[in-house]
Image: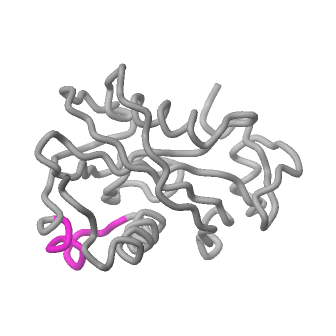
């Protein structure tokens, strides 16, 4: 099954399931759906940052400070967060990501709106990111991430999630521990 054929829950402005549709249709019609964003830190507290592959359906070749993706039909946010983190990092046995916040993101006509559940997880395992998802990766300190905000082209929904975390954490952009 291709990514465009994956079945997603369609939700309303209050995050209640109102139907299901293939991802391609959800994007084309701008239907509200669910996504997870997982901020991954290594043993030193550095953040996993990557550049998306040029084949991604939305925001190809842009940088992201989160791993994650869409929540499948009937899947919980928590289940999707663990699945997506393990898939994208190329690991198994990751601790369960901890939920931090949730907000409704509007893509400004790119692919509709999506409820964005943001998580944190510590990954002390060696990572082997999915080649289909990740073109480049590295672990950066919070200061290194902040220094690149104005110079690298970031996925807009990831930037929105970053700003949500900064607001919750008092503008620090994250804690190392």
Question: Splitting the image into 4 quarters, where does residue 15 fall?
Answer: bottom right
In this rendering, position of residue 68 left or right of residue 74: left
Q: Residue 96: x, y in percent?
A: 43, 33
Is residue 72 part of the magenta span, yes or no?
A: no
Q: Is 137 placed above or below 151 here?
A: above
Residue occupying the point 18% across, 27% down? 126
Q: Main secondary structure of the magenta part?
A: loop
The relative height of residue 144 versus residue 138 in the rendered view (above or below) is below
Q: Position of residue 143 (x, y in %)?
A: 13, 69
Direction from residue 160 to residue 112 in the image, left or right: right
Q: Position of residue 16 (x, y in %)?
A: 82, 55
Q: Quadrant of the N terminus?
A: top right
At x 46% / y 45%, what residue is drawn?
68
Q: Is residue 150 magenta?
A: yes
Task: Judge by depth and name the residue closer to the eye, 139 or 155.
Answer: 139
Range of the magenta residues? Answer: 145-154
Q: Quadrant of residue 11?
A: bottom right
The image's colour scheme reads one colour
Determine whether, in the image, residue 7 is placed left or right of residue 62.
right
Residue 140: x %, y % from top left:
14, 55
In the image, 132: left or right of 99?
Answer: left
């Amino acid at each position: 099954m291709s990514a465009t054929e994956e079945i997603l829950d369609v939700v309303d402005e209050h995050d209640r399931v109102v139907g299901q549709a293939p991802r391609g249709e959800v994007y084309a019609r701008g239907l509200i759906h669910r996504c997870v964003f997982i901020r991954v830190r290594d043993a030193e507290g550095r953040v996993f940052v990557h550049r998306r592959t040029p084949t991604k359906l939305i925001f190809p070749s842009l940088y992201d400070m989160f791993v994650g993706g869409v929540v499948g039909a009937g899947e919980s946010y928590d289940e999707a967060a663990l699945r997506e983190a393990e898939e994208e990092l190329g690991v198994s046995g990751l601790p369960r990501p901890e939920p931090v916040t949730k907000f409704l993101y509007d893509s400004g006509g790119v692919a509709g709106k999506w409820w964005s559940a943001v998580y944190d997880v510590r990954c002390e395992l060696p990572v082997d990111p999915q080649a289909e998802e990740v073109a480049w990766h590295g672990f950066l300190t919070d200061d290194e991430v902040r220094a690149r905000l104005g110079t690298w082209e970031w996925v807009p929904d990831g930037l929105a999630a970053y700003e949500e975390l900064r607001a919750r954490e008092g503008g620090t952009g994250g804690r190392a521990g």
